[in-house]
Amino acid sequence: MLNIAVFVSGGGTNLQALIDAESRGEIKNGKITFVLASNEGAYALKRAEKAGIASAVVNRKAYASKDEYDKAVLAVLEDKNIDLIVLAGFLSILGEELVSKYRNRIINIHPSLIPLFCGDGFYGKKVHTAVLNSGVKVTGATAHFVNEITDGGAIILQKAVPVEQGDNEDILQYRVMRQAEWEILPRAVSLFCEGRIKINGNKTEIM
Ligand code: GAR
């Protein structure tokens, strides 16, 4: 059984999707054992508490650089035997030390079809604003591995979602979460825990 740490910054609906999938037996060979938040106000912490999952806050604002932040996060993880880190609405960028220590063992959920509407500055509702301003008729979500390039790691799963006339950021964000993120993130996590993701450079194959 693999130990999973989920990193969060906000509402934690993706964390909830993972918790619910685990309780339905849909995270095969994996268990969420720890939640780390980048700020104490994250509602996701309440979801962790309700589910009986240990949590900690490592406040991004308390550290001058992402490298210092990395060291603090690594120190918290040290004795926890974590096999997989899941970034579920974690809005801080991780540094190179953490990424390299957990190489091919960090999964992120991004609310667009990568390589569109991603990279530095594209997070949360900003992604959906950019999608709406562009006029595309289809968007979606991507579960991918994390490397040193923001949203640049190997793609595991993607799901497309229509952009409807009259959408605003809130409506579109909710549709992308409900139809794509809450489905593909738990599935990607389970595939990882089952050892079914083969990585070839920047591509993956599901076994
Ligand atoms: C989600 O839409 C997630 O995909 C996005 O932030 C939201 C967090 O919601 N993440 C990013 O934009 C990362 N670049 P949640 O806290 O309710 O899961």
Image: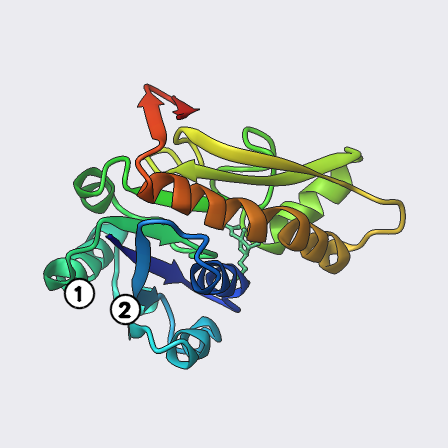
Q: Find numbered disc 1 in the image and state the secondary structure of the residue it sits on.
A: helix
- N-terminal of the two: label 2 or label 1? 2
Q: Residue at x 21, y 60 (%)?
A: 73
- The picture places residue 66, in percent across and down from the top left corner, at 27, 52
Determine whether label 2 and label 1 are within 8 Å by CB.
yes
Q: Residue furthest right?
A: 165
Question: Tag count in the figure?
Answer: 2
Which quadrant: the C terminus?
A: top left
Instruction: Identify the residue under disc 2.
Output: 58
Q: Nearer the viewer, residue 36 or 183?
A: 183
- The picture places residue 120, in percent across and down from the top left corner, at 47, 41
- 52 relative position to 155: left or right: left
| Type of amino acid at the residue the image marks with label 1 | Val
Q: How is the image coloured?
A: rainbow
Residue 202 falls in image quadrant: top left
Asked if the residue at label 2 sits under 8 Å from ligand 1, the reply is no
Mark 2 vs mark 1, foreground winner is 1
Q: Find numbered disc 2 in the image and state the secondary structure of the residue it sits on.
A: loop
Q: Residue at x 31, y 66 (%)?
A: 36
- The picture places residue 195, in percent across and down from the top left corner, at 30, 36
| Type of amino acid at the residue the image marks with label 2 | Val
Q: Residues within 10 Å of mark 1 (few under 14, many from 20)?
A: some
Q: Residues within 10 Å of mark 2 (few under 14, many from 20)?
A: some
Instruction: Identify the residue under disc 1.
Output: 76
Q: Residue furthest top?
A: 200
